[in-house]
Amino acid sequence: MGRVTRSQHTDLPSTLGLPLALVLVLVLAGLAFGLPLVDEAVPAQRAIPDGAAYEVGAGVTLVPPPGATLDVTGTRPAEDRGTVLFRIGPVRYAVAVQPFDGDLTAAAVRLRQRITGTSGYQVTGTQLAVSTAGGLAGLQGGYTAGNRGGRYAVFVAHGLTIEVTVSGGDPDLARTLPAIDASTRTLRYEDR
Amino acid sequence: MGEPVRPGGVRAAALVRNPAFWVVIALLVAGAVRIAQITWRFFEMYPIATLTAAGLFALLAVPFWLFVSELDFLEREPPSLRVVAFAWGGLVATTVSIPASTALDNLIAKLGSPGFAADWGAALAGPTVEEIAKTLGVVAIVLIARAQVNSVLDGVVYGALVGLGFQIVEDVVFAIGAVALAGQGDQIQPVITTFLVRGFLAGVWSHTLFGALAGAGIGYLVVNPDRTRRHRIGMAALALFGAWASHVLWNSPLFRDGLGNGALALLAVLVFKGLPPLLLILYLVRRAHDREAAYYVAKLATLRDPTLITENELKVLGSGSRRAAARRHAAAQAGRRARATVRRLQRAQARLAVDLSRSEGMADTVSKVREHRARLEELGHPEAVEGTPSVWHTVSAVGTTAVAIAVVWVALSALGGG
């Protein structure tokens, strides 16, 4: 030992520094930019049957608005929580269910803080009381972000918080909000 | 397997003449800009929580860094390369992993189903992207300082440091994510909870460990030129697969349901999902360490000069616990100065072993060893050897273990609701 032989000197990867470094850059670029490009190329939206109840998670269901599609990138159902993302044209309609041990006021404060914690987002107007056909009581309000508007609603039931957020351009929102409001009113909790 | 060590060193001047070095520096700068942007956004929204998270997780890095340094006692890696490895994990691997993991998780939902992604998305997407991005950090070290990676243990050290850098930055991101999710403003409670869960309970079997395994594979690939290229690439791939599989097991939904929510359930998850990879990887790291230590101790044994290293010191130098025992013995026999001198002597002896392996000029190192030996003799403790284990040390070790178990149990009970 002690002497480094010629075969060792010409062994990989010692003599291929720059080409291998460029391969390394290519692999990193493939991960950082290539995978997101492939992701964008694969469609995320799935058709859902009109009028059928959709389970968000943890026993919470709702009937999506007519013509809505399911965006699988924002949908993650689970036993004790869940999220679902619907798209009605350019409008996003998201529902998130998670364990929560506070009351409705605390849940609303939490959701408003999260909305205003995002750069450029502001809550507008006052909150209104809302309820669903299944008897869930909640609070509803609005927010803006640049040229986009939004609506939020929050419900608390059976140790869960159900957060609804809707966002889109003002004309699109005006057109779709009645159907979305009707869908939100179908929110229901079923003990399993 | 041939010799466990393939001697070599690297000089700074050679480093800057290497084009690959500048490619790696450019990647580090790009990663630093991206992570600085993310951190600044966090800081604007949650300044106290961000500073707390950065401070807590920086502290968490200290014991890991010290452990890796002790592992690396005999043939120490240059601080500059250790910093590059750490920075790769914290800046480059994280920057790449954030968009790539999200994209892969989305693809799992698109090609599988949202339910499958909810269960297995985090288990498959994160490890797949992150283990590749981290392992490339060890490859980067090889490209810029090939001669510095001269044992499997060196691969372990660089891999662990890449993993440590990744772990610290990821933990800070998770902590601020928890603050945002809590929706209670700039609070530190979610940071503390994240620190307990990700840093304290899950920290041991996390990226540092997985990185060490993948790094061992790169080390093996580089230091075994007598093996066929196919064999070495196969072994490196196997190590990367092992790191990936350990990570997948840890992130998987297995044992998530059915064990309840108490402290015992949390302990069971830690034991079943974390312990097997932990023990396997620690065993492999121990083997790599012992092989390297045996190589350098054998080099020193050829000197047959007790003024440089005695027979008893040869038995001590190859083991971290024995080196520590020798320092404790020196402190007990001749005070704190003797302890510090024993440490300096051990470092000089290790440096001498490396010089011997590289056939480099040893005059400076030899005079340093003799200088420390003379100092020890002045202090009345001429030989850096272990003493008989004291009752106090045994009691202290048992007490520390008991306190550690109690702290873990309290944390498990608090987090598991038991």
Image: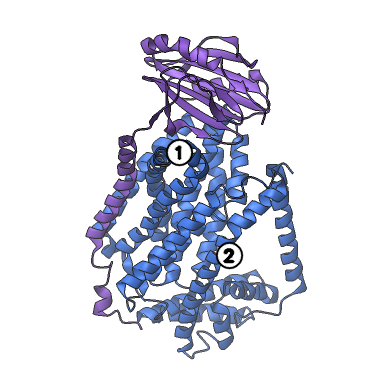
Chain colours: A purple, B blue
The mark lying in front, picked from 1 and 2, is: 1
Residue B198, given in percent of the width and then of the height, sits at 57, 47
Return the chain for callout 2: B
Helix, strand or loop for disc 1: loop
For mark 2, what is the residue? B279
- Tell me: B63 left or right of B352: right
Q: Which mark is residue B113?
A: 1
Where is residue B253 drawn, in percent x and y?
Answer: 56, 47
> Quick one: SS at disc 2?
helix
Image quarter hosting the N terminus of chain B: bottom left
Q: Residue at x 61, y 75 (%)?
A: B322
Say if A156 sits above or below B150 in the image: above
Q: Is residue A61 left or right of residue B16?
A: right
Q: Position of residue B128 (x, y in %)?
A: 42, 51
Of B25 and A146, nearer the camera is A146
Whether residue B125 sits left or right of residue B406 in the image: it is left
Callout 2 amino acid: Leu
